[in-house]
Amino acid sequence: MQKITVLCVGKLKEKFYADAQAEYVKRLGRCCKLELLELPEQRLPEDPAPAQIAQALEAEAAAIREKLPKGGAVVALAIEGKPCSSEELARRLSDFAVAGKTQVTFLIGGSFGLSQELKKSADFRLSMSPMTFPHHMARIMLLEQIYRAYQIQQGTRYHK
């Protein structure tokens, strides 16, 4: 069974996000070994300078690197990444498994995203959309798409 880690910067606060996450965690429990890791987001002033943002992103990147599981594939969510269909995500997860990468880690940054270094070192940069979404919503969307990918692989009616 594939192990999926979703490593997120920031904590879910709103109940509706937490409820949605709990539902997909329950569903994914039948498909993979899922681990959700939340790291604290760096505090920044109301209108941070670019240097302050860069410093915060590097501090978050260091925390991510400490928690990053060893030996697996890393997928960074990034607006400038490659968009892919649900079927393509299902194929990518299968391809990782075939290549012996049974551990797949998805990285979701905080309000300002992920450091450039983290994005460059990832095996794949995934864009959910060219639109901007709250990072908490991106987490729910990602969990749903991972669940959908497994349903596609299993040939269920969930994916129409």
Image (cartoon, rainbow, N blue to C red):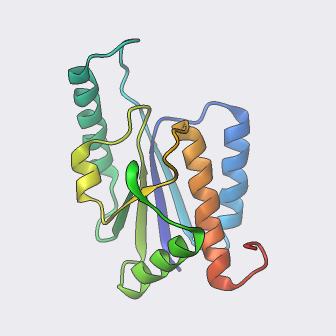
| Residue 99, quarter of picture | bottom left
Position of residue 108 relative to residue 25, above or below, is above
Screen quadrant of the C terminus: bottom right
Residue 153: x %, y % from top left: 62, 82
| Residue at 66% from the left image edge and 49% from the top image edge | 21
Residue at the outermost top position: 46
Residue 6 x/y as whole percent: 48, 55
What residue is shown at x 48% (from left), y 75% (from top)? 93
Answer left or right for 5 relative to 155.
left
In the image, taking residue 104 as reference, residue 13 lies left or right, namely: right
List the single residue furthest toward the right: 157
Image coords of residue 32 (percent x, y):
57, 72
| Residue 24 relative to residue 106: left or right | right
Q: Picture coordinates of residue 143 (x, y %)?
A: 60, 57
Q: Quadrant of residue 134?
A: top right
- Which quadrant of the view contains residue 16? top right
Q: Residue drawn at (41%, 87%), measured in percent from left and top?
A: 98
In the image, taking residue 8 as reference, residue 30 lies left or right, namely right
Extreme-front residue of the structure: 130
33 lies above or below 108: below
Q: Residue at x 31, y 37 (%)?
A: 60
Tally of marks: 0
Can the viewer see residue 85 in this picture?
yes
Q: In this orientation, which residue lies closer to the viewer: 17 or 125?
A: 125
Question: In the depicted view, which residue is nearer to us: 142 or 38?
Answer: 142
Res. 31 in view: no
